[in-house]
Image (cartoon, rainbow, N blue to C red):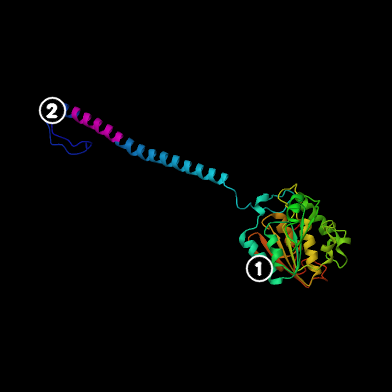
Amino acid sequence: MPTEVSTCHTSQLVPPISPKSQQPLLVHLAHSYKSCQQKRKMKLTRNKVIPLLLFIISSISIIRLLRIAITTTASSPSSSSPLLALSPTISMKPANATTLTAKEFKLLANLVSSRAPCNLLIFGFEPPYLVLSEINAGGTTIILEDDANKVSTIAASSNSFQVFKVEYQIPAGKAYKLLKLARRNPACIPHLGPLELSKCQLLLKRLPREVYKLKWDVVVVDGPRGDRPEAVGRMGTIYTASLLARAAKTADVLVHDVDRMVEKWYSWEFLCDENLVSSKGRFWHFRISNQSSSTSFCPSKSTPLAVK
């Protein structure tokens, strides 16, 4: 019988053999070597295929997870939009994003309570503002609203405040251009004369006489909507609120929706971050003190927005 040789180890030493048995042995070795090589190939093929299958299955699972995540993100409302640099193209927040939160209303309620009875002026209407008028019992509360439906709804709801229907003209989409013009117009700097006689294009000149006549302790800017480029913006209300606050000895001005570009940049321009005393949610709270004779909105520093 031929001497046995271990599979796939042809280099192993084989005892001496006779010439007669050499040929069968070579045939046997060749057959064994071929069989061994086939087994090796099968083993290598298995070793390569299994990781490849695992990789494909893992990739499919990851793709499915990404699809689910993208679909969920697209279907759920975004809590905030990215803030872009102020430019001729202005991004806006949807109207339903302007509703007051509990912590925002608490900021307002605590402030009005600390100053009541006081003169309280509110640009724009939200239902919680009716509670503010009750907190300010004994003081004067005036609400200015451009939505005729809201005015008719709230006009007869209480005797503790007055509500006036007002009109705004300039759409929010013109905020960038308007700010450039205002910076170049000497009529737009703070001045001592009657506000309604100002020639600055930002000033609201058709408000009720009571607005210009009284010294306001608290001014809230939450209107007009300004949630789309074509909707009237809050450029004029923020500018006018700033001048009304400077006419008083000390006034608190609160601007809502400061996560939107127009509200943020106009607040920095005319109310100044040096006067910012607190913030809560989408409210910024400014305190203007002893600036009735100032001829600059932000005298201590240059404005952060460069408009050429």
In the picture, the quarter occupied by the C terminus is bottom right
Residue designated by label 1: 110
Q: Which range is magenta? A: 27-42
Report crowding for label 2: few under 14, some 14 to 19, many 20 or more residues within 10 A (C-alpha): few
Q: Give whichever of 152, 267 is nearer the camera.
A: 152
Image quadrant where residue 278 sits:
bottom right
Give the vertical position of 50 relative to 195 (above or below). above
Question: Is residue 29 located in the magenta-colored stretch of the structure?
Answer: yes
Q: Give whichever of 87, 97 is nearer the camera.
A: 97
Element at badge 1? helix
Dot in front, 2 or 1 = 1
Instruction: Give the side of residue 295 with respect to residue 153, left or right.
Output: right
Give the vertical position of 111 relative to 124 (above or below). below
Tell me where residue 186 appears, x and y as whole percent: 86, 61
**Point 21% across, 31% down: residue:** 32
Q: Give whichever of 210, 168 is nearer the camera.
A: 210
Q: Is residue 93 visible?
A: no
Q: Earlier in the sequence, mark 2 or mark 1?
A: 2
Residue designated by label 2: 21
Type of amino acid under label 2: Ser
Residue 7: mark in rendering:
none
Q: CA distance from mark 2 to mark 1?
A: 110 Å
**Point 67% across, 64% down: residue:** 108
Tell me where residue 304 appears, x and y as whole percent: 72, 61
Type of amino acid under label 1: Asn
